[in-house]
Amino acid sequence: MTSSASAELSRLLFDGRYEQTHQDLHELLLDPVFDPREGLNMTEAGKLAYERSRAVHAGLERPRDVLADPWRLFALAEWPSLVDVSTFSLLMVHYNLAFGTVVEHGDREDLKDLFDELDRLDSFSPYMATELGYGNNVAALRTEAVYDPATETFVLNTPDALAQKYMSYSGFQDVPKLAVVMARLKADGKDHGVYPFLVRISDGKQLCEGVHAAPCPEKPVQGLDNGLTWFDHVRVPRRQLLHGDMGGFDDDGRFRPASGNRRKRFLRAMNRILPGRLCVSSAATGAGRASVYIALRFAAQRLTNAPGRNDLPIIEYRSHQLALYTALSRTYAMTLLLNHAKREFTAAPQDAVPAELNHLVAITKALSTWEMTDVVATCRERCGAQGIFSANRIADYGSLLQGLVTAEGDNQVLLATTAGQIIAQYDDGAEPAPAPDPAGRNLGDLAFLAAVVRHREAELLREAAAAMADDTGDRTYFEAWNGTINTGLEMARARGVRTALESFAAAAGTLKDESARTALGLLAALYGLTELRRDAGWYLARGVLTAEQVERLPREADTLCARLQPYTDALIDGFNLSPELLRAPIAADDYVSAFQQRTSAFGPAADAVAEGS
């Protein structure tokens, strides 16, 4: 397969933006500050993540400029996690959630000093929304900011243990912190709902007066200073209310919320969550690509035996191929789905986000992080004991994904909410589309695969909407929804899979290189077959697949794997990764020598290195 094929696949995966948006981030991560450091405790690892975050900030344009270009923000989410998962977390909280909120709601002359402080990264900005007792239900948070007109300050207070801010970065007191805190604004005896406030948490020496923090329990891999934070009547100057267009103070000093209902103002205050979900998906797919890249490079070198043969690369086994090529197909599918969501997001008006875009972003976030969780787990297992070591990266990516499935909205809750909104919009008067006829259809036909999944999506939606509309019996709304929720979740997932398959088909039509087009078609077919196998019983029961087709699915998948093998290098070269970037010994051209060098193991490779030094 030619280098032109890899270049075409790279253009596809990075949406034609690699050189302008991604390349300098890739090169920045080659800096020695990102070299592995063995033997650090969790505090030392956390402090290193802050050091690396400052290095990224110093090597790029200012955060305000990154935020002005969403493609750049998404790229920033994608790359640092490949060499330090904690650095990704710090950067995304500061750039997108916290500073993004300041840019959108507090870019005013009277806040210029604090704005510039965050733009220079003189202080990090934690984002404090989630509370211990309310989790995903941020709208019900209890932290309160009561306006005192006599001093023109807000009194920020945590009324009880359930209202403690949860998981935000407040543990390292020697790191300057200027947090965005979501609190319930109370003025003139009225509760005006949740608004963001800029609150100084620490001055670089200690926590500020009235601010208290306790560390969360230790997490594997990520040594960040997550904590519980609470406020004891902290005075916050009036100017540090980030009200934006959500309200403001009259000349007489009275607070006036903007017109409209409280729910809309809350969503406006929290609107960095939407691009945040695309950032989370960017990190997830980046980790998935790196995991598959490492696992496939290792599989081409890792020797095993076979009946009648010795020293056979393990990738020759069809069982190994099925696991890793399926992971590769899912990684491509989620990358293409994410690219589609990014394009839709950047093209939409940001002051009035369409409901369909919200649905697409939510489904993309949930499906991509779930899929990449499985991909990373598969790759770790297929690398055997080598996959356990942090030096080989994949285990660390597993820890990252565990956090991503709950970041910016827990997947299960997020997808259920989205499903409920889609069901509520269903037009029960629409003529149902006929099921695709399976007779004589090729299971590798991408159009047929997409049509089959589209039919499943439509039928699940129709079924869920009918169940919700059924007024027989004496059911509460909760009982009706509780009986429908799992069907709704499956419907929303099917919508994501269908969109990914359609993105695959659209992408294939843009490739000029014949070998790249062939490789992508095979990969797309494997992804589609994987999805059909997942729900084969449903398709068979409804006549969308025949019994013979269902029985043939495993053989078809094996055949696709055999046909994909010659295209492996080009497919993973399209990721624009390298052993030098990832610094994972098993991804090296000679993994035995690389592993010996990393461990200072005795042996020929180590001796050769010593003689040449």
Image (cartoon, rainbow, N blue to C red):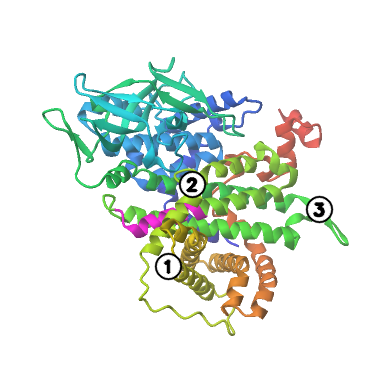
Q: Nearer the viewer, residue 107 or 134?
A: 134
358 inside magenta stretch:
yes
Mark 1 element type: helix
Residue 6 location in percent, x, y?
Answer: 54, 58
Give the number of the disc on residue 465: 1
Q: Which residues are magenta?
A: 353-367
Left/right of residue 386 with respect to residue 274 in the rendered view: right
Mark 2 or mark 3: which is in front? Answer: 2
- Point 59% across, 49% down: residue: 373
| Mark 1 neighbour density, 10 Å: few (under 14) some (14–19) many (20 or more) | many
Determine if residue 15 is in view: no
* Location of the C terminus (image quadrant): top right
- On the question of residue 400 being in view, the answer is yes
Residue matched to label 2: 410
Residue 71 magenta-highlighted: no
Which badge, 1 or 3, is on the more N-terminal residue?
3
Q: Which residue is mark 3?
A: 304
